[in-house]
Image (cartoon, helix red, strand yellow):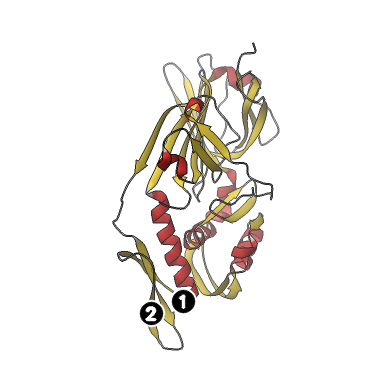
Amino acid sequence: MVANKAACRLVLDNGVDLSSRVNPRIIDLTLTEKRGDEADTLDLTIHNHDGQIAPPKVGKVLKLALGWETGDDVLPGMVDKGSFRIDEVERSGPPDIITIRARSADLTGDYRTRRTKSWVDTTLGTIIQTIAGENGFSSRITGELAAIPIKAIEQAGKSDMAFVRDLGRRYDAVATVKAGTLIFMPLGSSTTPSGKALPTLRLTKVDGWSWSFRHEERTGADGASAEYHDQDAGQRKTVTTGGSKPKKLKKVYASKADAEKAAKSAADKAKRTAYSFTYDLAFGDPAITPNMPVELQGWDSEIDGMKWLVGEVTTRFGAGGLVTAIKLENAVGG
């Protein structure tokens, strides 16, 4: 019988592997990955009772990989979890400890700088590809989304990150940067940013410890309505999707097509976030990523019958080994 032995690899941006020095001192390492525009975050706490560790400087970049060295219950191997720019370093005691807080290195720098720009008579694909190129990213956007015409849209005093986030909300898409690639893909897409098939995660009650299923009516709305400016008629008009109690969107859109898409996206999001499922897995699995489709089996017909997506993953490494907690959203509403 082979014992389960977790592994962690931390490498500085100058190529120095810190694992042999830092790993024995790790009190806790927590990686939080989210599907949306929010940066993935890394929190690391290590003991420094002998003063032999020089704290890294703010602005340095750490590359992280997590996985298992050995184990009969797990799949051995390391998973690259990306690069993280150190935002904060804290020293405290006694006993002397160092706390490091970092966030995805892709979501820093000029990508967060406010700017004003008008986009006229273009496509969603052109916008995403242009923003990616200007920030040194590659891009991946599905053909269906890329072909959407954009008559006019303003990026008024917003960073590229905030603007892409708003586009993601409008078109109900994953809109984020991972590993140097600006990703703009439908929620629940069956492929990874590299184009590979995204596997479905199948979970039962024997795969974890505590779990929770929640159904919450947040606003009472059962649809959404959006206004647009009809240039031919010279007046505002409204489109509605869903039921008899639509939520009115604040923005006025440039075309009927834009308004219809925004209303549908808002209605779908309301349905999707009304249901949630959280699960603490028995063994950490760093291969789980946001937007991964999930099938639950062994609960009841309601829970098992839903299509689920991973919305957030929290992975912890420390004295307890490697553990993973996931938050799921209903992929298609109720």
In front here: 289 or 239?
Answer: 239
- Indicate the position of residue 256 as horizontal and vertical percent values: 46, 76
Q: Which mark is residue 256?
A: 1
- Disc 2 target residue: 237
Picture quadrant where residue 278 is located = top left
What is the residue that sits farthest to the bottom in this orientation? 233
Structural distance between the alpha carbons of marks 1 and 2:
8 Å
What is the residue that sits farthest to the right in this orientation? 15
What is the residue that sits farthest to the front in this orientation? 301
Circles 1 and 2: CB atoms closer than 8 Å: yes
Q: Which mark is residue 16?
A: none
Density class for disc 1 (Cα within 10 Å; few <14, some 14-19, many ≥20) is some
In front here: 180 or 150?
Answer: 150
Query: Which kind of residue does numbered mark 1 sit on?
Result: Lys
Q: In which quadrant will I find the N terminus? A: top right
In front here: 15 or 323?
Answer: 323
Residue at 34% x, 64% y is 243
Q: Earlier in the sequence, mark 1 or mark 2?
A: 2
Residue at 59% x, 44% y is 105
- Residue 108 showing in the rendered view: no
Picture quadrant where residue 233 is located = bottom left
Query: Which kind of residue does numbered mark 2 sit on?
Result: Lys
